[in-house]
Each structure stands twice: as C-alpha cells, then as structure tokens.
Amino acid sequence: MSVVPLMVDFTDKKVVVVGGGPIAERRVHTLIEGEADIEVISPDVTEGLFSLNAAKKIRWQQKYFSPEDAVDAFLIVAASNDTSTNQAVINASPSNALINCVQEAEEGNVQFPTHCKRGRLSISVSTQGASPILASQIKNDLEDKYDEGYEQYVDFLYEARQLIKQTSLSPNERKVILRRLVEEDFFNKDKQVHMLHHLQSQQ
C-alpha cells in the first residue's frame, strides 16, 4: 500500500464505527475532535462510548453490523475484535468510501497516524503498521520538544499571517517578516504583542 498524508475535514461527515471496544473508543475520540457525525454499531460498548452516546455526541446502534449500515458513509472504521466482522464491513463498504481497518491496516485505504496536537499545530507519525510502538515513542519525543507553549505561539503566527495578508507589503517583504517570526525569539509574548500592533498599523 502506498499512502499519502492528508489533513481531512470531517465536519458533519457521516462516520460509521463498527465495534465498541477500547480501540473503537480511541477512534471515536479522534473523530469527535473533527466534529464528525458519528454512528457506532456494536451490541456492547465501553463505558466511555456509553457516556458519549448519553451526551448525544455520538449515536450508538446496539446491534450487529449489517451492510445497509455502510450506505452513504464518508468514513467507515472496522474496529471490531472479530476478524470476520471486520471483513464483512470492508466487503460492504461503498467503493468511494474511506475505510480504516484496525486489525490489518492494508485491508483499508485510510490509516490513523499517531499524533500530538498543540492547538493549531498537529504533528502526525506513521510507520504504516510496521511498529505502532516506535510511532508512539516518536510521538512522546515530539510532545516533549513541542510543549504546551506552542499552542499560543502558533495562534500568534496565525493572527500575524492574517494581518500580513492585508498589508500593502510586497510578496518578498511578506516572506521576510514571516521568516522572522519563526527564526527569532517570538515566543516572548511582549514581542508578539509589539509585532501585532506594528502589523495593524500597516493596514
């Protein structure tokens, strides 16, 4: 399988998760962050999934999977601990649907990478199924390097970039400023405020 890393907008997209165990719960938590419309198909679910259903953050269908459950799904996650059920999900999935299979990554066409998130900053790591443990170790290293301070810093970069777009500066001048924002010590909040005020004055 040859894969291409992408960032996908799942807002209001129909997602079907087949399975109610811990792995299915992890997938659901990831997809909730993306504001997906999530339906879980499983006779039983974890306490976490039960609570999410009670809070109306997902819809739990307390039953076994049937082919009609996959109709119109944007993404289908085969997360059952039963191999035959996962294969039935894959077989029933529409040809244009995104499919993730937790048991055998190559059975689907989408993988969920390990990732760390700091606000707008998202860093993903994948070994394409070779070693989830290695991916987890690399993620931990990244979380140590890019700590919580990056969340506010990246928000600053976003705001500064929006202001720069509205100035009459030439493309080259804009690039020079954007490079400065990541090369100099702009973790300092006073410098950030000063820069934002400066850019606002250029409107």
Image: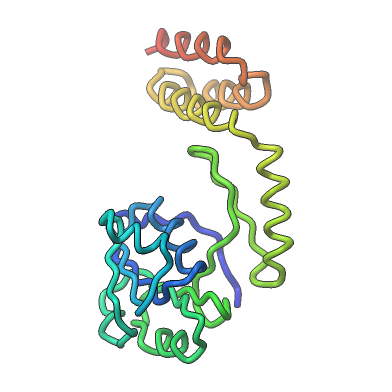
- At 59% from the left edge and 28% from the top edge, which residue is drawn? 149
Residue extending farthest to the front is 47
Relative to 53, 176 lies left or right: right
Classify the position of the N terminus by image quarter: bottom right
Q: How far across and down, in percent of the image, does residue 41 sit?
A: 34, 76
Q: Nearer the viewer, residue 55 or 126?
A: 55
Q: Nearer the viewer, residue 115 or 50?
A: 50
Q: Nearer the viewer, residue 55 or 40?
A: 55
Q: How far across and down, in percent of the image, does residue 186 sit?
A: 61, 19
- At 42% from the left edge and 60% from the top edge, which residue is drawn? 48
- At 55% from the left edge and 60% from the top edge, which residue is drawn? 5
Q: How far across and down, in percent of the image, does residue 129 sit?
A: 65, 72
Classify the position of the C terminus by image quarter: top left
- At 59% from the left edge and 33% from the top edge, which residue is drawn? 148
Number of residue marks = 0
Q: Nearer the viewer, residue 181 or 129?
A: 129
Q: How far across and down, in percent of the image, does residue 112 sit?
A: 53, 64
Above or below, 97 against 122 in this view is below
